[in-house]
Image (spheres, helix red, strand yellow):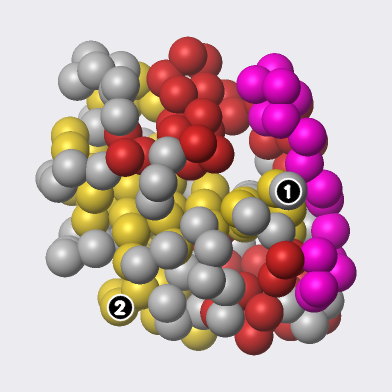
Amino acid sequence: MLAIVDSGGANIASVRFALARLGVESVLTTDLATIRSAERVILPGVGSAAEGMRRLQERGLVDTVRSLTQPTLGICLGMQLLFDGSEEGPTETLGLIAGRVSLLPASSGVRVPHMGWNTIEAATQSALLEGIDATARFYFVHSFAAPTGPFTVATTTHGTGFSAVVRRDNFHGVQFHPERSGTAGACILKNFLEAKL
């Protein structure tokens, strides 16, 4: 059973549609027992870190998410919430990955928010990236980004380099939107669902 944490994010419907295209049923839930017992968990999110954490706190989900032991995938803001905190606010987040998310620097020819298609560059081997070609492009929409570090699985660049895919133990995160990234995004979701992570 795949549980999608109902964090109120605007991308939840598109994530569910993408999973349905793969023939996968998902349960959108805030029920703690359902989330804990799921085989895989997705933490979606769109918007600000402060608002994302407020929604998790209101639903009593913070400790539940922190305690998960099954493969868990954070998408966009969901990935950023895995870190210690965000400059956006500033806000303390879930503290599952060391580091703080920061505002992308704007410069000549570099617009923030970052909205568009980027390739990613693998920093380490990962079952999540199995079958992803170096020319594959993914759709990004964000103003804040995670640093690179020992948790970085893949990077990309928009004015500056940042983590596009991260992992710590059973927690995985993608800054891009796999549900809006065509065949390459579908491959990421399929790998998350099927690979030994």
Q: Is residue 10 visible?
A: no
Give whichever of 135, 20 is nearer the camera: 20
Which picture quadrant has residue 155? top left
| Residue 24, magenta (yes or no) | yes
Cα distance between the residues tagged 2 and 1:
29 Å
Check disc 2 and report the residue beneath it: 98
- Position of 22 relative to 86 (above/below): above
Q: Give the range drawn in magenta.
A: 19-34
Identify the element where label 1 is drawn.
Answer: loop
* x 44%, y 63%: residue: 171
Residue 1: numbered disc? 1
Question: In the image, is 158 to the left or to the right of 177?
Answer: left
Whichever of callouts 2 and 1 sits on the residue coming sooner in the sequence is 1
Crowd rating for badge 2 (residues with CA inside 10 Å; few <14, some 14–19, many 20+): some
Q: Residue at x 80, y 74 (%)?
A: 32
Where is residue 139 drawn, in percent x and y? 45, 28
Q: Observer-nearest residue: 72 or 15?
A: 72
Residues tagged 2 and 1 counted as in contact (Cβ below 8 A):
no
Q: Which amino acid does label 2 sit on?
A: Ala
Q: Is mark 2 on a helix, strand or loop?
A: strand
The numbered disc on residue 63 is none
Q: Is residue 86 rendered magenta in the image?
A: no
Which mark is nearer the camera, 2 or 1? Answer: 1
Compared across the picture, whether 74 is left or right of 146 comes to right
Q: Where is residue 31 in the image (x, y as percent from the top left)?
A: 86, 69
**Depth check: 135 or 10 in front?**
135
Give residue 151's quadrant in the image. Answer: bottom left
